[in-house]
Image (cartoon, coloured by chain):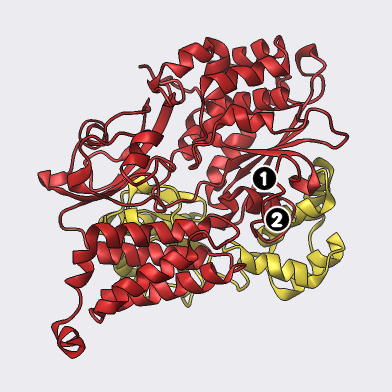
Amino acid sequence: MDPVILPLIQKLHTIDVYEANGGYKAFKKALSMTPEVVTDEVKKSNLRGRGGACFPTGLKWTFMPKKTDKPKYLCVNGDESEPGTFKDRQIFEFNPHLLLEGTLIACYAMGITTAFIYIRGEYGKWIRMMQKALDDARARGYVGKNILGSGFGTEVIIHKGAGAYICGEESALMNSLEGERGYPRIKPPFPAQYGLWGCPTTINNVETLSNVPCIINNGWEWYSKIGAPKHPGPILVGVSGHVNHPGVFEMPTGVPMLEIIHKYAGGVPGNKAIKAVIPGGSSTPILRGDQLDGISMDADSMKAAGSAVGTAGLIVMDEDTDLVAVLARIAKFYHHESCGQCTPCREGTGWLEKVLNRFVRGEGRSEDIDLMMDVANNIEGNTICALGDAAAWPIQSMIRRFRDEFEKRVPTSVKEEAA
Amino acid sequence: MLSSESLQRIENFKKSYPHPQAVVLPVLWIAQEQYGYISQDTMKEVATLLNLPFGHILGVVTFYTMYQTKPIGRNHIEVCTNVSCMIRGSQKIVRHLEGKLGIKMGETSSDGAWTLSEVECMGACGGAPMCAVGEEYYENLTPEGVDRMIEDFAKRRVGA
């Protein structure tokens, strides 16, 4: 299948080249359809969110109230900060108009008059690229009032984050946009009822919206036949760690993990064995290298394997990797990024980091392994947002699948004392 | 005091957002660009300007890692040490930078040229190990690559 999100076309980021290659055709087509039909196309296509949760996008759109006296908002989530994830940046750089076109179609489908594209502050260079694309799109009449004489109008605003992983959580993103600290909100109420400034709001990931134009152009049937039937479409898979050719690859969903690692990413340097793979960003449960056969990059396959697609950011680790050190680093990340609202997450992530550092220093105790499991189990499900779960899953999966790595690190003297 | 240019940019932001408080993050960015960092006095200035409590601005500034509350070096090197970078040798890069610049992580060189920070994932895992200097990303770093990067910045300074 030829790439549709990141096609190999020189200077596609410029509006002239984008238009010359069929750009904004989908938006024009959408404007000739009713908003309900546009939403229905996306719903039937079975496009599922690419931000991590794989939630059906069309269904999410239908949650927006049709009749309301309040303004409606769209937040485009470009806070991409999950370790191992670097796909949205490719869209900002190589195909910014595709994202804008998807954003505009989403606004039309939901009757939204203001969209915010929230981009992490570290992406300063890419924020400027998006701003340039937006300015050009506005100059051609695709953004603003009465777009192309259709009577429909929408504003698009690019908003720069300031360094906080938690702002990728949809309700924290909204608080951040409102000029607050990025504290997640208790749900319900859900954003479609009570979002930005209490108004109906939908939050979609950058890659998700970039899938919308090809659905409108080619129809839902075409899209739903790409890749895995229950989780179809093209997907951007980022591969990093111990591979010969790390990078972002566009492929249909459902490609076997081993094919991604060996064919797309060129295999493991020195032909070493794969010890472990984090399949979809640091929060997704880790997989053993010897269990990868038969697992593919789609929601069902990943779920069956005891993990998740997440952001489809694979981190490959070869046989020489110190997994205890890897887990300690992940724990440090979640401790640093916990917003501090909920006690289990604020305190638990700190204790996990401390205990793991004890193992790294070679001072771990046998009982610490179960202690970490206990702490993780008490964080999971007991917090306002999913950061707590994201901190717990790597701990639980690592201990379940690599317990021996931790047992090996308990010094003999400590073991004797315990006995 | 915020310059007339900064104030004009703030006015423009106010016009584009549907709610006045939404401009807090953009205003803090503008203030940081002008002053280099955000002091308590700046926070008070922003609070007055936006008619918000000082405590709100303090809370926001200290929540986000990219707002600097102390002066930093002219060139801010941020090294990612998260998993993808770690397993491809970010510690070697950290040690090399510390040796080369004569400062530890979190410190600023005595001539005010460099600040070195350890940061979380910057979304360049495919180019690990990486660092950023200001908004510029440097990927697939090696000790030699780090040397070249530092020399480039030293030259730019002479040219400027």
Q: Amino acid at mark 1?
A: His
Tag shown at residue B25: 2
* Residue drawn at 47 percent across, 12 percent down: A222
Does B151 sit above or below residue A300?
below
| Colour of chain A in the rendered structure image | red
Residue extending farthest bottom: A417
The spot of residue A28 in percent (x, y) is 67, 12
Q: CA distance from mark 2 to mark 1?
A: 9 Å
The spot of residue A341 in percent (x, y) is 62, 67
- Quadrant for the N terminus of chain B in the image: bottom right
Q: Amino acid at mark 2?
A: Leu
Q: What residue is pinned by disc 1?
A: A159
Is residue A164 visible in this depiction of the protein? yes
In the picture, measured across the screen, residue A141 lies left or right of residue B68, that is right
Proximity of marks 2 and 1: CB atoms separated by less than 8 Å: yes
Helix, strand or loop under label 2: helix
In the picture, measured across the screen, residue A119 lies left or right of residue B90, that is right
Does A382 sit above or below residue A368?
above
Query: How many callouts does the rendering have?
Result: 2
| Colour of chain B in the rendered structure image | yellow
* Residue drawn at 34 percent across, 67 percent down: A328
Residue A117 appears in which quarter of the rendering?
A: top right
- The chain to which mark 2 is attached is B
The spot of residue A233 in percent (x, y) is 44, 23
